[in-house]
Amino acid sequence: MTDTTPQCATFGLPSDTGGRDIGIFMPMANGGWIISKNSPRLDGSYDYNLKVARLADEMGLDFIMAMAKFRGYGGEIEQWKVSLDSPLMMAGLAQATSRVKVWATVHTLLQNPAVTAKMIATLDQISHGRAGLNVVTGAYKGEFAQMGAWPEGVDHDERYVLATEWIQGIKALWTEESVTRHGKYFQLDDCQSFPKPQTRPFLVCAGTSGAGVRFTAEEMDALFLAGNNLDELIANTRKAKDGALALGHAIRAYSMMILVIADTDAEAEAMVESYREGLDEGALHGMMRAYGFLDSEIGKENDFTRKARSALMAPHVAGSPATVLEKLSEIFEKTALDGLMVIFPEYLSMLPVFAAEILPVLRERFPGRVMEAASA
Ligand SMILES: Cc1cc2nc3c(=O)[nH]c(=O)nc-3n(C[C@H](O)[C@H](O)[C@H](O)COP(=O)(O)O)c2cc1C
């Protein structure tokens, strides 16, 4: 009997064969993912990102990914005031690296699908088949309203309808000679796009809502998800992957995590505590405004602020290399995650420690054979 279970395509990643993909969330906006006056002042510059990308490439990480951001959160630290353009930065980093996958972010609200198809096909050529696209619908009004690009009347779920039309157009442009589609949001009329990508770019999305997860299951190769604790992460991962299978698609699931690594557990915990103490209230308020909180709600305590008080903008694992290794192993053992995208408070000092002391053991414990990526 033939097995009809949906299978993931092959992308030259450890997860093709049951391993775990480990990548880096690139620090392309100042301050990284810690809104604290006490955390290292990452400058979000290309030179810093170049050093990080070269280290990631040399040290055997699987992917580097850059978000797309158009407005910072303010505060004393002016969090994310400075951010580089995601696809352009990844094009530069593709040229500077040779094996790590390079995934860029594009907002469906901002770029025409034909422009994006060509952009990512160009990234495929520069990187010799290592390109990927993180599809983001755009959730933060202020970021788009400032440039007149926030369509009123297109609500959260409708933005995923728009995104579906967008990505289906891009996939057609990557494979067909001429594309004609008259959709609700995009008009492609005998639209042509060359070159075609040599390797089908890896598609990933971090939609966590019902509409976002469904979109990801139907159109993407991987989903980013999170949980407030390990039990939630186990449940969310299982639910997303099983939900996708029920729709007839196999997807990979990733989570992002801040790794605070020091010589000892006590030192790492002290760093986490110091970040918490240095929380920049102004930046927190800016972040809340971006997330759609009303002015009347800002300054009051709620679930969001209680979580944000850690100053860490993503779940974290802290400790000595040995402790971090055991915690990450536990996450991989207990969840159905196919990989992690890691963040460091300071990349140039912590990435080499991670790559030397943690990554090789994770590879041994969760082996996957990297195969050739399938051609487009
Ligand atoms: C790993 C990760 C990367 C993301 N990258 C971006 C980004 O680059 N730009 C952006 O505006 N939103 C980004 N987001 C937000 C998501 O695209 C999404 O809007 C959010 O997770 C809420 O999900 P929903 O759209 O299904 O409600 C990211 C989220 C995660 C977890």
Image (cartoon, helix red, strand yellow):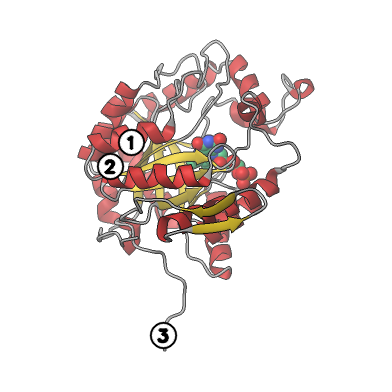
Spatial separation of the CA atoms under disc 3 and disc 2: 39 Å
Badge number at residue 44: none
Tag 2: amino acid: Ile
On-image quarter of the N terminus: bottom left
Contact (Cβ within 8 Å) of mark 2 with mark 1 = yes
The reply to whether the residue tagged 3 has its Cβ within 8 angstroms of ligand 1 is no
Query: Residue 145, relative to residue 113: is it above or below?
Result: above
- Foreground residue, 215 or 305? 215
User: How many circles with numbers are drawn on the protein?
Assistant: 3
Residue linked to disc 1: 91
Task: Give the percent coordinates (x, y) of residue 163.
Answer: 59, 49
Mark 1 vs 3, N-terminal side: 3
- Foreground residue, 26 or 18? 26
Task: Give the percent coordinates (x, y) of residue 358.
Answer: 28, 42
Residue linked to disc 3: 2
Q: Nearer the viewer, mark 3 or mark 2?
A: 2
Tag 3: amino acid: Thr
Residue linked to disc 2: 126
